[in-house]
Amino acid sequence: LASFLSNTLTFATSSLMGSISDEKGRRGIMLLGIGLSLMAPLNLVLLQLFESMDPSFYYASHALYGIVSWMAIALSALSDVMPPKWRAPSFGLVIAGFSMGFALSPILAVFLSHLGVSVFALSILIAGFVFACVSLPETLSPEASEKSRLKRLAERPTMETRMEVVQYNLLRPMKELLILNRNKLFRLLSALAFFSSVVSSADQTLFLYYVEENFGFGDKDIAILFLIIGIMGMFVQTVLLKPLNSLIGERRVIIVAFLVGTLHNYLYGVAKKKSTIFISATIASLTGMSFPTISAIKANNVDELEQGRIQGALYALSSLASAVGPMMLRYVYHQTKDGGGFGKGTMFIFGAGLYLVAAVCAWLLPEEQANSNLKRDAKKRSSLVDFDEGYFDYGAIQDEA
């Protein structure tokens, strides 16, 4: 329930927070989001120290963490300073950091008690927060901030009554999401991001329960599984993603990622032994190339005044999918666990079908808009054209904007 509420809050506020960061800057909102992320681990430690403490404090703090998604703001900050060809790999480095934690976290349980692990995790988060407060720079330029503020004021409707002001502020989060409906490219990206996030969130939530119940996974098996997933995640994001982007372009990277997602979910569904699960988990990391690449394509197709808004809107959509995905696949599981469909693994085969739908959406992406290497080549070609003196190329100005 807490995760559902957290994802729902992120869906409601992420695009608005991104839009605000386009005006006010990234740093303050990021620090607020990181600060909120400390509350749940803090309450978890307190719960173990004081047995009489009400656990609802922990669940409430976990849910409130969704008010400010610092990840979306972090991607916006990277977009401020990275050129288009490096955005997907730089986003991948952020994901690689999570993969490193994913790989190392099970090892802590071997040497520390439950309380010790909780205290260690909280200490790391506090250290990260202090480091961000001291070292995190503001990436949004004052000029871009002022342009964004003036643009919003120009788009703001005339409001004469307090009720109109209240109505505008209540509806603003939904209006910020309308950027996802701006053109065919954004609609396709939104569709494939939604379908893939439905499956990936359900995999993360239900997968461990599934392998423990049906394959007898113990603590050692889970630790090995986490280590494989983490190491492969770091390898894919830090070593593989950039060369693939340069070689085949962002569009084909997404297609490959979703076809691999289709394969590994199908293998989860038909697996009969542990080795199949480990092989599937190994190749599953390739699916992780999709999120940073989708984020990069959207960043490359908006100007500097909307980086926060587009990343926030995309993260809001992913949060909505994360809220409904586990419920959807859990429903499929309960309907098929007693012999219906393909048996207990039907939910993963259903997930493979959703990944296949996402792959089709990726195939429909217009290549000239999706691939940053094509845009660079086009700019190189246009730079070789000789213009007559006094000629003013409005199209080139618009493309640069």
Image: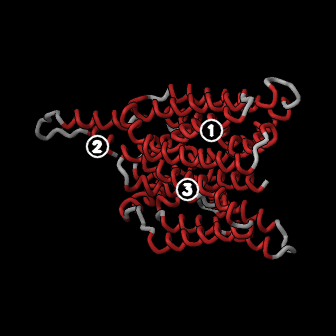
Up-down: is 97 above or below 318? below
Residue lying at the far top of the rendered structure? 341
Pick whichever of labels 1 and 3 is earlier in the sequence: 3
Q: Is 350 on the left or on the right of 356, as rendered? A: right
Q: Residue 281 got which mark?
A: 1
The Cα–Cα distance between marks 2 and 3, rounded to whole angstroms, is 31 Å
Q: Is residue 181 visible?
A: no
Q: Amino acid at mark 1?
A: Ala
Here the colouring is secondary structure
Circle 1 residues within 10 Å: few <14, some 14–19, many ≥20: many
Q: Amino acid at mark 2?
A: Ile
**What residue lies at 49% left-to-right and 42% top-to-bottom?**
236
Q: Position of residue 26 (x, y in %)?
A: 48, 63
Residue lying at the far left of the rendered structure? 389
In front: label 2 or label 3 = 3
List the residue tagged with mark 3: 71
Of helix, strand and loop, which one carries label 3?
Answer: helix
Pick whichever of labels 2 and 3 is earlier in the sequence: 3
List the residue tagged with mark 2: 397
**What residue lies at 80% left-to-right and 37% top-to-bottom?**
214
